[in-house]
Image: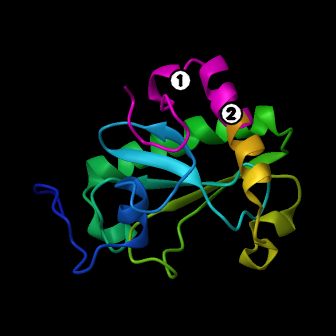
Amino acid sequence: MTGPETNETAETSLFTKIIDGDIPGRFVWADDVCVAFATIEPQAPGHVLVVPRIAHESYIDANEPTIAHLSVVAKRIAATQVRVFGAVRPGIVVLGLDVPHLHIHVLPLHKAADIAPSSARAAGGDELDETMTRLRDGLREDGWGDFVPVRMDSPALA
């Protein structure tokens, strides 16, 4: 698809509800194209999802400029995760089987098993707040402060 972006999901996705503030989220990145927020079942501390504001059911449904932008944002976040969480490598995964809204998992890897979906576990609010605060601070330190939302619970930049 190379034409104008449109909302391609018939129903409002869980991620759209998070972006719209109908469901709470912990945001570390926001721009005109996408947001990044904590997953409630991280595979490693600092695990986030990079999600386009416009819902597409899968990776192949979004246009190439959107995919390119998501990739750049994922790389920036991954570099900060590696530094802040002392990871060996970044993990970048597009699965999309659980929520019909394109999203990229970005997580710091300490061992190969971290990338396995079976390593996901429910995280408490205090743990998510602490790890997302560390990531938000790290993104600011790395020069991406213009994209770190003012409040962790909102994708708004002002």
Does any portion of residue 79 appear in the rendered image?
A: yes
x, y percentage for residue 109?
80, 53
Q: For the residues marked 1 and 2, what is the alpha-carbon distance in whole angstroms? A: 10 Å
Using residue 95 as the reference point, say whether residue 34 is left or right of it.
Answer: left
Span shown in magenta: 134-158
Q: Kindly check if marks 1 and 2 are in contact, taking CB atoms under 8 A apart as contact.
A: yes
Which residue, given by chain and number where applicable, does mark 2 sit on?
Answer: 80
Q: Amino acid at mark 2?
A: Thr
Percent x, y for residue 84? Answer: 79, 33
Q: Which secondary structure lies at badge 2? A: helix
Amino acid type at circle 1 is Trp
Q: Is residue 67 above or below residue 9?
A: above
Label 1: element kind: loop
Point 48% across, 75% down: residue: 96
User: Residue 2 colored magenta?
Assistant: no
Circle 1: is it few (<14), some (14-19), or many (20+) Cα within 10 Å?
A: some
| Along the viewing direction, whichever of 13 and 24 lies nearer the viewer | 24
Residue under the point 22% across and 80% down: 10
81 shown above or below 21: above
Residue at the spot x=33%, y=74% of the render? 57
Specify the quadrant of the image occupied by residue 141: top right
State left or right for residue 101 relative to residue 128: left
Residue 60 on image: x %, y %: 33, 70
x and y percent of residue 86 in the render? Answer: 86, 38
Answer left or right for 62 relative to 99.
left
Quadrant the N terminus occupies: bottom left
- Give the number of the disc on residue 13: none
Image quadrant of residue 130? top right
Q: Which residue is mark 1?
A: 144
